[in-house]
Amino acid sequence: MNVQVHKNTVVTLEYNVTDLEGELLDAGQEALVYLHGGYDDIFPRIEEALHEKRVGDTVTLKLQPDSAFGEYDASLVQVEPRASFPPGIEVGMQFEGAVEDAEEDDFVLYRVTEITDDTVVLDGNHPLAGTALVFTCTITAVRPASTEEIARGHARGANDEDEDDEDDDGRNAPACRCH
């Protein structure tokens, strides 16, 4: 049976992501599995394009930053004293930080982008913020979601380690595993 992609189906995709010049940003080495139907498991434009498609169908979309990881926000870059960090700090490390003027449970994941003798530069933007993307995917499987998946609002994929995983704040939406 070749099930169509509809609300409350679990969709498995083989995918890749490039920038507009064709540079590969994410080879999609692991299949992307998501719950279809407005659960914020994937970027809305991708979900719309996949609606009513079937196994074997391929979709290619150009996503502007506002439809992907957002515009680059310079206010999310902070320069902190080097002495505030542990001795082994390296570029690429990540730290969770509070968002000013936000609710107490809001946070930003900051990446260390530069280290000098006196300072550490932290960037709270997704690495692909401000980048237009080309997302290409082929549907490899579609199945009805379980009652538990619907209640959780998230498909139980092959990469899940803990059924109690909490969804992130959407800034790093699992539309691709781009780093």
Image (cartoon, helix red, strand yellow):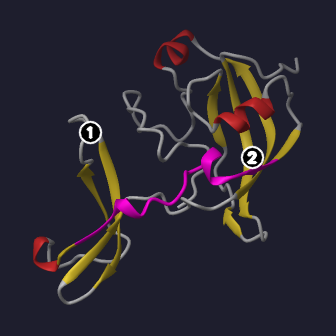
Magenta residues, as a range? 61-79
Q: Is residue 112 left or right of residue 17?
A: left
Q: Residue at x 24, y 48 (%)?
A: 100
Nearest to the observer: residue 165 or residue 61: 61
Residue beneath disc 1: 102
Q: Is residue 8 left or right of residue 91?
A: right
Residue 167 part of the magenta-drawn span:
no
Residue beneath disc 2: 14
Secondary structure of the residue carrying tag 1 is loop
- Residue type at numbered disc 1: Ala
Nearest to the observer: residue 66 or residue 3: 66
- Residue type at numbered disc 2: Glu
Number of other residues with Cα within 10 Å of mark 1, as a class: few under 14, some 14 to 19, many 20 or more? few
Nearest to the observer: residue 159 or residue 98: 98
Secondary structure of the residue carrying tag 2 is strand
Number of other residues with Cα within 10 Å of mark 2, as a class: few under 14, some 14 to 19, many 20 or more? some
Q: Is residue 98 left or right of residue 163?
A: left
Please state the horizontal and vertical placement of residue 42, each as a whole percent of the image.
61, 37
Residue 78 part of the magenta-drawn span:
yes
Give the answer, above or below, for where 147 lies relative to 16. Answer: above
Please state the horizontal and vertical placement of residue 149, each as a whole percent of the image.
53, 18
